[in-house]
Amino acid sequence: MMHTPSTGVTLVYHDAMAAYRFSEHHPMNPDRLGLTARLIEELDVLGQGAGSLREPFVADDDQLRSVHGADYVAAVRQASGPDAEAAPGFGLGTEDDPIFEGMHEASARLFGGSLVAAEAVLEDKGVPAVNFAGGMHHASRDKASGFCIYNDAAGAIARLLDSGVRRVLYVDLDAHHGDGTQSIFWDDPRVLTISLHESGRSLFPGTGFPSETGGSEAPMGAVNVALPAGTRDAGWLRAFHAVVPPIARAFAPEVIVSQHGCDGHERDELTNLRLSVDGQRQNALDMAELATELTQGRWIATGGGGYDIVHTVPRVWTHLLAVASGRPVPLKTPVPPRFREYVLQRYGVEAPLKMGDDAELWWRSWEVGYDPGDPVDRAIMATRKEVFPAFGLDPWFD
C-alpha cells in the first residue's frame, strides 16, 4: 500500500543557536539566523497547519562520536572554556575557526538540531524537516574547517543509518565543496554524497573534483560537479538537472539530506558563482520534487554558508522552509514592511522589496545537446563521464 505523505514541515530552531559566534567580525554572523526566523514569522510560513516548530538540544558526546573522533570532541571541549588554548592540529584556533568560550555547547546544539530533524523524519515519514542553522559541511571526523566545528548533517545521516535506513542521498548545494561530509562517508556504500560547487581551482577548500568518487569500500559513493566562477543560474541549474536527478534515481535513496548554503549568491563576497535568490529557491523546489518522487517526502534540509546576512540569507532560507512545507512563497511577494523597518533600524540598510531578485530563470536541459566550447558543459561532462557508467547511465544521453 502506498504511503500518503503528510502535509507540513518540521522546523528545528531556537534563538540559542545564535551562540555559534566566532567573533564580532567573523564572516559567519549568527544574526543571519535571527533575521531568517523573523522573516519566517512575518510571512507566517508555519501558519495554518503548514508546519510545526521543535527546539534543538545540545548533543552529548556519544552522539557527536557517531561521526567525530573521541579525541577531537575532547579537544573541542578543552578549547571552549575561559582559559582555553588553540589546538591547530584539530583545526581549532585558526583564522577560519577561532576558539570562543562556549564553542562546544554552541556547536553541539546545531548538531542536536539536525538530530531532531532526523527523528522527525523517522517518526512521520512524509514530513520534511528543516534546520537552517545547520549544514556545517566542512567539519571532518577529526578536524574543524571552514567555519564548521561539528558536522550536523553527517550526524543526521548517521542517526538515519543507525535506525535501519539502508540508503541515504546527501546533496550539497553550497558554493563550497562539501568535503567534510564526503570524507566522513568516503567508505560507506549506504551513503551517496553529491556536491555541486565552485571549482576548487578558484575557491576553498580546493577539493571536489570529478575524480573524487569514493573509497575502496564505496568506489562510487561520491559525485562532484566542479563549476567555473561566473556560472550563474542558467549554468548552475543546467548542471543540477544534468547530474543530480539521474544519479539520485539510480541510487534509489530511502531518505534525502540536503545542504542549502546560499553563499553562491551574487551579493556574497566570499564566492564567485553569481546566483540569484530565484535560482536557489528553484534548487529547493527541485529537491522537494526529488524527495516526493524517490523517498515519499523523507527529506532533511539544512542551511550552510551564506554571508550576505540581510539581503540573501533570510529570503533563501525562508523560501526553503516554505517549499518544504508544500506552500512555496511566490517570488513577487513583498518583503513585509515590519521586517524592512527592523533591518533599517538595526543595520542601517534597506532590505529587499520583494522575495525574489527578478532573475530570468531559464536553463538548457541536457537533452538539447552538449557544447564542448562551454566551460559549464565541460564541467558537467567531466562528472558524467566519471560516474554515470557505474550507475548504468550513458554520460552522453541519459
Image (cartoon, rainbow, N blue to C red):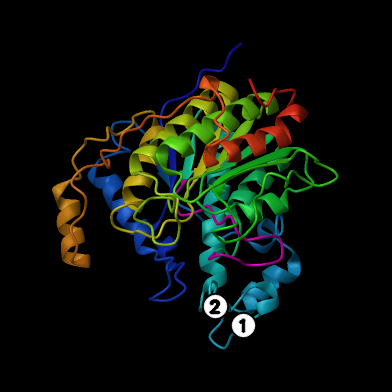
Nearest the eye: 167 or 278: 278
Q: Give the residue furthest to the right.
A: 216
Label 1 sits on a secondary structure element that is loop
For the point 33% across and 31% down, the residue is 328
Mark 2: which amino acid? Ile
Q: Position of residue 345 (x, y in %)?
A: 16, 65
Q: Main secondary structure of the magenta part?
A: loop
- The quarter of the rendered structure image containing the C terminus is top right
For the point 63% across and 24% down, the residue is 249
Nearest the eye: 86 or 278: 278
Label 2 sits on a secondary structure element that is loop
Mark 1: which amino acid? Ala
Sequence-first disc among 2 and 1 = 1
Nearest the eye: 211 or 167: 211
Q: Give the residue furthest to the front.
A: 373
For the point 68% across and 73% down, the residue is 90
Q: Is residue 146 magenta?
A: yes
Question: Residue 268: which numbered mark, if any?
Answer: none
Q: Quadrant of residue 310?
A: bottom left
Nearest the eye: 363 or 93: 363
Side of 22 relative to 160 (left or right) = left
Q: Position of residue 21 (x, y in %)?
A: 44, 70
Crowd class of label 2 (few under 14; some 14 to 19; many from 20; radius 10 Å): many
Q: Is residue 297 visible?
A: no
Side of 78 relative to 13 (left or right) = right
> Which residue is tagged 1?
86
Which residues are drawn in magenta? 131-147
| Separation of residues labelled 2 and 1 (CA atoms) | 7 Å
- The quarter of the rendered structure image containing the N terminus is top right
Q: Position of residue 8 (x, y in %)?
A: 41, 31
> Which residue is tagged 2?
99
Does the CB distance between marks 2 and 1 fall below 8 Å? yes
